[in-house]
Image (spheres, rainbow, N blue to C red):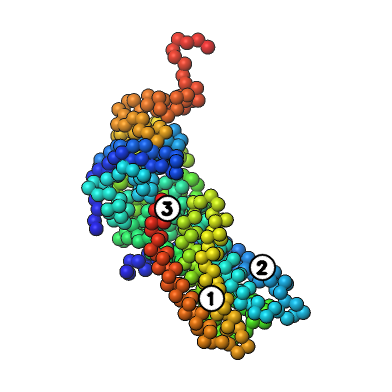
Amino acid sequence: MNVDFTEVSVRDVSRHYGRRRALARVSLECRSGEVLGLLGPNGAGKSTLLSILATLLAPSSGEVRYGATTAKEAGAALRSRLGFLSHDLHLYPELTARENLQFFARLYGVPAVGACVADALELAGLAPRADDLVAGFSRGMRQRLALERALLHQPRLVLLDEPFTGLDDASVAALVDRLCGLRRQGRIIVVVTHDLDVAERLLDKVAVLKDGRLAAFDVAHGRIREHYRAHVAPGRNPEGGLVPPKPEGEGG
Amino acid sequence: MTMFFRVAGLVMRKDLTVEVRSREIVYTTIFFAVSCVLVFAFALVKDGRPLEDAAAGIMWISVAFAGTLALGRTFERERHSETLRALMLAPASRPALYVGKLLGVVLLLLIVEAILVPLVGLLFHAPIWNCPFRLATLLLLGTVGFSAVGTLFAAMLVRARSRDVMLPILLYPITIPVIIAGVRGTAALFEPVPAVDLADMWMALLAFFDIVFVTLALWTFEPLMTE
């Protein structure tokens, strides 16, 4: 079964863990060539939503449609169109960078594994260290490798959980460029991030989650910080400080 | 079908490569199994004469304890970087992933048994060379049955907080038929005149348990692993 799709829609999705509600009736959609950002405080349900989109979790109610199909209908064929970079990176530290990529390329049935892995190592900037164990890599190097692992099989839907964590400025810029390239290729990208600078540069759509509910969706570009301040961190200055800036004219 | 075995082989090879690099599980499991046999030898061998029929029981208890340790550590490794989730995300057949993990555990336990069995033979004066092929078959069948259930439970419990406690609690009651058949079959082979017919009967029973356990595990692995 060959599955392809140009949009993903989340319809009234709820998810409960026992009596605890992680997501409540969330609806949103994202189309080919768009980058959707999920913002929200810790525990807002962002990672749960990402896991549901990745088919790792089944929603308690509601449904996720990948074009005309659902995870239940398409099964493994759908999983071959999804790429997921989790916060945990999904790499084997006892294997080398090359071995990690080869293993996952074969698992995904990627044709021409050797060339594909060589390209991925080049894109991750790890070609000179291809045969080093991942255990010896820095967080940033692992992050870059994990991203290429998630993209090896050319997924249509790319799901990224805080991909900018632990990256230096140059690596963040490189990752933003890479994601812009994927957007131009018509991929659908969903990113969980707390980095507002990146959000403003990269995202086409923003969904703000709070306490499992969708607090705002399709936020206009210029209003991301405003929504962040309102829903995510009311006591936090989105410019980076812990104290909100004082209004002009107010004395100390 | 070719794809099924290709994926199973891929997962097994990956597990073995990781183990060859770290040697963590094989060393700790062998150390634990050997310690177990030595403790039993101090308790049950008096004046150089072991307790009658003790060897078969000691051997299988040590295999079960070492197996539990190996199962826990194998899946702890997958939990560490959440790589089990990466396996579950792959478009590969999930039962094939299960078979790959199972083969890795079985191979690991067979290596442990290759050291354990001669040690039991030496310390408990067990005639392990009476029927070596039957003994090897018995061990293989018992190991597959034990690992089939163990792999399923260890995968299920990988994210449970009390997984180290839960694994033996769930595993031992269900694998008791396998362990009993293993002990009785081995004891039959360790008789001064090996009771081959009796051992064959226990072996047939073990093969039956293996078929039942592997079939049930293949059937339930996918729904159990979907959160």
Question: Which label was assigned to residue B103?
Answer: none
Which callout, 1 or 2, points at the residue further toward the start of the chain?
2
Q: Residues within 10 Å of mark 1 (few under 14, many from 20)?
A: many
Q: Secondary structure at mark 2?
A: helix
Subunit that carries the residue with mark 1: B
Q: Nearer the viewer, residue A52 or B91?
A: A52
Percent from the top left, x then y, of residue A138? 50, 47
Image quadrant holding the N terminus of chain A, namely bottom left
Percent from the top left, x then y, of residue A122? 38, 51
Percent from the top left, x then y, of residue A231? 40, 27
Question: Which label was assigned to residue B181?
Answer: 1
Q: CA distance from mark 2 to mark 3?
A: 35 Å
Which callout, 2 or 3, points at the residue further toward the start of the chain?
2
Callout 1 touching callout 3 (CB < 8 Å): no
Q: What amino acid is labelled 1 in the image?
A: Ala
**Residue B205 at least partly seen:** yes
Q: Nearer the viewer, mark 1 or mark 3?
A: 1
Name which residue lies at 44% across and 55% down: B84
Name which residue lies at 27% across and 53% down: A73
Q: Is residue A246 above or below residue A6?
A: above
Q: What amino acid is labelled 2 in the image?
A: Ser
Q: CA distance from mark 1 to mark 2?
A: 24 Å
Subunit that carries the residue with mark 3: B
Residue identifier under label 2: B35
Q: What amino acid is labelled 3 in the image?
A: Arg
Q: Is residue B176 left or right of residue A124?
A: right
